Amino acid sequence: MKKNSIPLFIGVLVSFIAIWLVNDYFLVDQCLDNGGSFNYSKGLCLLANGEIKTSALGKYLIAIYFFMGILISLFVSFSIRKIFKIAQ
């Protein structure tokens, strides 16, 4: 791996972790707070009364994750390059 691509690789890893944590917060934690159980294989929130709860942001989550991933990846990559003075 070239020295130039290491900061970008680290940025992508950090963005994946951030997306995973945000996904847990938006979907799983809100489901559990409402007294439901989250079905990970189907990505559904099953409430105690048998209802299936969907997130209000469900339609927009993919776009949010996409832009969040790009912005975090670029920010981390540029920060690492600036801190360690790695040329592009």
Image (cartoon, rainbow, N blue to C red):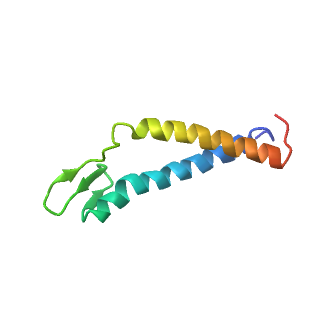
Quarter holding residue 6: top right
Q: Is residue 24 left or right of residue 4?
A: left
Q: Quadrant of the N terminus?
A: top right
Question: Could you tell me which residue is drawn at 36 percent across and 53 percent down?
Answer: 27
Quick one: 4 or 35, which is closer to the camera? 35
Left or right of 79, for residue 18: left
User: Is residue 6 visible from the viewing direction of this image?
Assistant: no
Quadrant for the C terminus, please.
Answer: top right
- Is residue 66 visible in the rendered structure shown here? yes
Look at the picture and state if 3 lies above or below 40.
Answer: above
User: Furthest residue to the front?
Assistant: 56
Q: Quadrant of residue 70?
A: top right
Percent of width and height locating residue 47: 20, 59
> How many dots with numbers?
0
The one nearer the camera, 63 or 40, is 63
Which residue shows up at 34% across the image and 37% down it? Answer: 59
Please report the residue visible at 33 percent of the width from the left and 42 percent of the height from the top.
Answer: 58
Q: In the image, is 47 to the left or to the right of 85?
A: left
Q: Provide residue 65's location: percent of width, then percent of height.
A: 48, 41
